[in-house]
Image (spheres, rainbow, N blue to C red):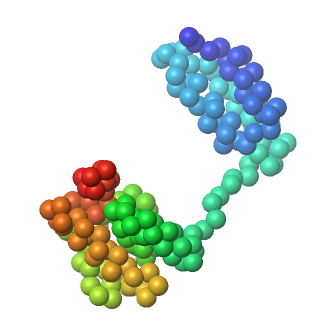
Amino acid sequence: MSCSATTFTKYAAHLMSRELKISTIKNYMSPIRTAMPPGKEPDPSLYLRLLATYQKQNKRAMRVTQAFPLTLLYIIAMIEKVEASGRPTGLRDAALFAFGYRFLGRSEEDVECMIEDLTVLDDRVIAWLAEDKTHRDKTQTIVLKDRPDLKLGFRLRRWLEYLAGFGITKGPVFRHLLTNGCR
């Protein structure tokens, strides 16, 4: 069922009357246009003019809510919580939290890290990256120095030993676990 430009704009006005944030309104409106059959999308010009006016008149609608930063104290508390479960997912998540804190990469870089690209030493972890979002077509070797409170080497080694117990010595470091313990 197609949506006329009038209906499309009236719906946008309704959302604005509820004093929603700009990002929320855009999130509601986008699927409507993309769900329409080709050539039957509503003309968004009136909606966009209305949105621009709404934006000027309602500065609070532009405010973006951001999560608070995860400091070391929160990371350590999270690690302790997941390790307390004694489950394999706790081993994995503790290693992931410690690695992610020291690695300071994007989440997709953390999860794309391969076992064969890591060297775990007593006082550091050396990670090799084929490329990242910032350095396209450039390999990198990153040294992650350990900390006594994070115990990155211990946690990562423990997780890799758990995987090796299932014969997994290559592939993604951080992987989905099945109920039987591994995948």
Residue at the (47%, 85%) spot, across then down: 149
Farthest left residue in view? 167
Q: Is residue 36 above or below residue 89?
A: above
| Residue occupying the point 30% across, 50% down | 178
Camera-nearest residue between 112 and 49? 112
- Across and down, in percent, residue 23 comes to 66, 42
Name the image quarter holding residue 3.
Answer: top right
Asked if residue 18 is positioned above or below residue 113 in the image, the reply reads above
Q: Quadrant of residue 21?
A: top right
* Res. 96 in view: no
Front one among 64 and 115: 115
Direction from residue 88 to residue 164 in the image, left or right: left
Left or right, 44 with reference to 76: right
Q: Give the total number of marks visible in the rendering.
A: 0
Percent across and percent down for residue 55 are 77, 42
Looking at the image, residue 35 lies above or below residue 152: above
Residue situated in front as seen by the camera: 100 or 59:
100
- Residue at the spot x=25%, y=67% of the render? 162
Q: Is residue 34 left or right of residue 97?
A: right
**Furthest-right residue in this view:** 57
Q: Is residue 118 left or right of residue 106?
A: left
From the image, which quarter does the N terminus lie in?
Answer: top right
Q: Quadrant of residue 61?
A: top right
* Residue 94 % position (x, y): 41, 69
Residue 70 in sight: yes
Which residue is at 72% across, 23% downward?
11
Residue placed most toward the observer, 4 or 105: 105
On the image, the x and y values in percent for residue 71 come to 57, 74
